[in-house]
Amino acid sequence: MSCTRYLDQYVTDTLVETGSGKGRSIAFALACGFKEIYSVEISERLYKFCSVKFSRNENVHLSLGESVSWLQSIVKKLTGKTTFLLDAHILDFAEKHAEIVCPILQELEIVLENGKQLGVRHIILIDDAVLFNGKVKAFGNISKKDICDLISRIDPKAKVTHSRRFILVE
């Protein structure tokens, strides 16, 4: 089960998502009450699918591209506490579109540094935590420990919890 089902517990005005997929989390976030949703998808096929699916919703802002440079531009627009759903890891190498197949550490650094600049602690949900075991090539052999170490280095007071399905930073 995806971590998106927990979004209703972490509603802020804005949701920023990496990895739109088929738009399930976008639809759920709208139902939860997020006012603005920004999402990026690297697969042109999935981006087009979501563009059609959410074409009538002016509060959903979709982009086609890789998440790291996109996040760098999006965080500049933020003015307060934001919920982030980081899910840009590629599970199928046939869908590889970028050099970095699992940009989670770069994404986290951008989000955490932005929170420091704004003087807020963003809410961060990282999906597919079970695969961050240091042994999955598609996840860059990154472990939960690698993720937690980065968070501790940038924001030592952040509360980090994790389950089999997701990692939560608040």
Image: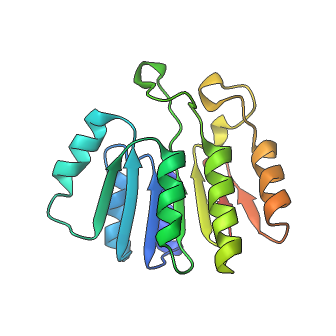
Residue 20 placement, left or right of 6: left
Residue at 68% across / 45% down in the picture? Answer: 105
Q: Residue furthest top?
A: 94
Residue 91 image offset from top left, x and y in percent:
50, 29
Residue 1 in sight: no
Q: Relative to residue 158, is residue 129 drawn left or right?
A: left
Q: Is residue 122 visible?
A: yes
In the rendered view, does 29 fall on the left or right side of 147? left
Q: Nearer the viewer, residue 109 or 123?
A: 109
Q: Quadrant of residue 22?
A: top left
Question: Residue visible at 61% across and 50% down?
Answer: 107
Q: How is the image coloured?
A: rainbow
Q: In which quadrant is the C terminus drawn?
A: bottom right
Q: Up-down: is 90 above or below 36? A: above
Q: Nearer the viewer, residue 157 or 31?
A: 157
Occupied quadrant, residue 116: bottom right
Q: Closer to the camera, 92 or 44? A: 44
- Counting from the top left corner in percent of width and height, residue 58 is at 21, 69
Q: Is residue 66 above or below residue 71?
A: above
Total residue callouts: 0
Residue 20 percent across, percent down from the top left: 38, 48
Residue 130 spot, x, y in % from top left: 65, 40
Residue at (72% x, 35% y) in the render: 142
Residue 135 vertical placement versus 72 (above, below): above
Question: Which residue does the image show at 46% across and 56% down from the upper left?
Answer: 17
